[in-house]
Image (tube, rainbow, N blue to C red):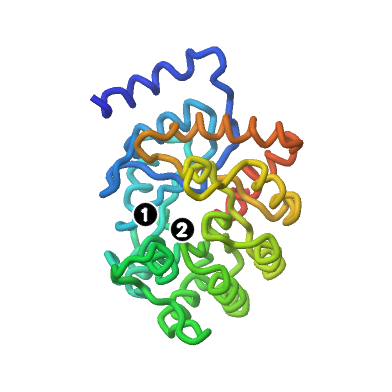
Amino acid sequence: MRKYLQYLLIVLFPLVGNAQDLSGVVDFHSHADPSIRPRSIDVLALAKLAKERGMRGVVMKNHTEPTGSIAYLIRKAVPGLEVFGGIVLNRAVGGINPAAVEEMIALEGHWGRVVWMPTFEAEYNVRRAGTKAPFVRTSVNGQLVPQVKEVLALVAKHELTLATGHLAPEESLLLIREAREMGVERIIVTHAVTIDMTVPQMTAAADAGALIEFVYGAIFERTRGINIQQYAAAIRAVGVERCVLSSDLGQEGNPLHPEGFVAFFKALREQGLTEAEITRMAKTNPAKLLGLQ
């Protein structure tokens, strides 16, 4: 029944009086089926909905499978929407696996544009959760493992975007500085507040050349105590020109991506952020990360 409802929503949303136009918005962090995690919508329905609401583009993220091929197909099915994919370097793709990144780069269409460091299987994420689950290690004794540097070389050579995933804040800073030294131009700190990055660390990451991501999905993680006031203060401290607003939505039970953006922007406006500032963070900055003009 849930899968039938998502298609009904695509038809009904444009008819709702308060369904706000999201022209130009680029969602750098979206989840959808197919996935091993419960999702509220599939990639095709999401793309149709995003286009209907005027969004410019979406990046399809999957924790276990590369999404460049999905982006290729969705672009054919929903022309006019900028759809990108990427790869998350979790265990399902071999962890820090340069060969997997090379395969994504070579894929027809070349729409796999983002390389995320490990997420739920990052060493920091596993240790913070207090489990004994296997993890992917990206550094040892303050030094990046050789495979990470091989991946960074590929990201730099092919002008991809590097995302820090769920690495520890200090490890993210180490990664960003090394990436910049190796010529990586496009870097984003994945939902910085969610990985417990402090405002001084965010500022240091931005000073080193990264954009800082703030996601609406984290607002629903009640146990973390993340709130919009915290977001607004951090954005002000870091600077809107160095921040990105993403949805990180698609989880079953959460709002769909466009509705999340509408609520996100409204909440930020209530914290004093202007329309021009929101435009910079939700449209201009993510577009530049993907090489869009």
Q: Residue 282, relative to residue 262: is it above or below?
A: below
Image quarter for residue 148? bottom left
Label 2 packing within 10 angstroms: few (<14), some (14-19), many (20+):
many
Residue at disc 2, secondary structure: strand
Q: Which residue is mark 2?
A: 113
Image quarter for residue 66? bottom left
Q: Percent x, y for residue 268?
A: 67, 37
Three-letter code for the amino acid on which mark 2 is drawn: Arg
For residue 265, side relative to residue 147 (left or right): right
Marked residue nearer the N-terminal end (2 or 1): 1
Residue at disc 1, secondary structure: helix
Q: Residue furthest left?
A: 1
Image quarter for residue 41? top left
Contact between marks 2 and 1 (CB within 8 A): the answer is yes
Label of residue 156 in the image: none
Q: Residue 80, relative to residue 89: is it above or below?
A: above
Q: Percent x, y for residue 234?
A: 69, 52
Q: Which residue is mark 1?
A: 68
For residue 213, side relative to residue 41 (left or right): right
Q: Residue 58, relative to residue 291: is it above or below?
A: above
* Residue at 44% in and 45% down: 30
* Residue at 38% in and 21% down: 9
